[in-house]
Amino acid sequence: MCLSFEWFDGRAARNKRRDEDGVSLQEAEEALLAYHSTIWPIATEMAEWLYINWTPQELLRLPAPNRELLLHILKQEGIDKQEK
């Protein structure tokens, strides 16, 4: 599976929805798990949004393996060096 051009063009709309409605723990986990697949941009987009918008307490709600994956994505993609 691969992502369409429309998916890439929809980033602003997805982030607006996330900003307004938030992100459930399940939604965050599912998106992060896409990192080791052909649809990995879903995971990097979610990781960046979580890094900017979730508090440390919210991040700690992620199960340990998913938290580790989030930190891995942030480091690999250079997101951890961006300003919050």
Image (cartoon, helix red, strand yellow):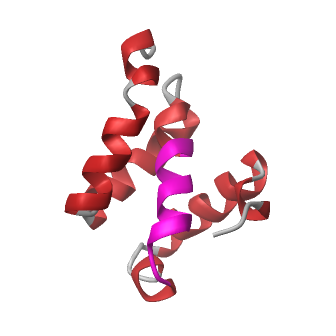
Q: Give the extent of the magenta segment.
A: 44-55
Counting from the top left corner in percent of width and height, residue 4 is at 41, 11
Main SS of residues in magenta: helix
* Depth check, front residue: 63 or 16: 16
**Eyeballing the image, is 35 above or below 48?**
above
> Could you tell me which residue is drawn at 48 percent across and 63 percent down?
50
* Depth check, front residue: 43 or 14: 14
> Could you tell me which residue is drawn at 40 percent across and 46 percent down?
31
Q: Which residue sits furthest left? A: 21
Asked if residue 20 is among those painted magenta in the image, a careful observer would answer no
- Can you say which quadrant of the picture contains the N terminus? top left
Counting from the top left corner in percent of width and height, residue 68 is at 61, 67
- Can you say which quadrant of the picture contains the C terminus? bottom right
Counting from the top left corner in percent of width and height, residue 29 is at 37, 57
Asked if residue 51 is among those painted magenta in the image, a careful observer would answer yes
Counting from the top left corner in percent of width and height, residue 22 is at 26, 63
Left or right side of 44 for 73: right
**Eyeballing the image, is 51 above or below 60?**
above
**Eyeballing the image, is 28 above or below 84?**
above
Left or right side of 11 for 56: right
> Could you tell me which residue is drawn at 42 percent across and 34 percent down?
11
Number of labelled discs? Answer: 0
> Could you tell me which residue is drawn at 45 percent across and 46 percent down?
33
**Eyeballing the image, is 11 above or below 79?**
above
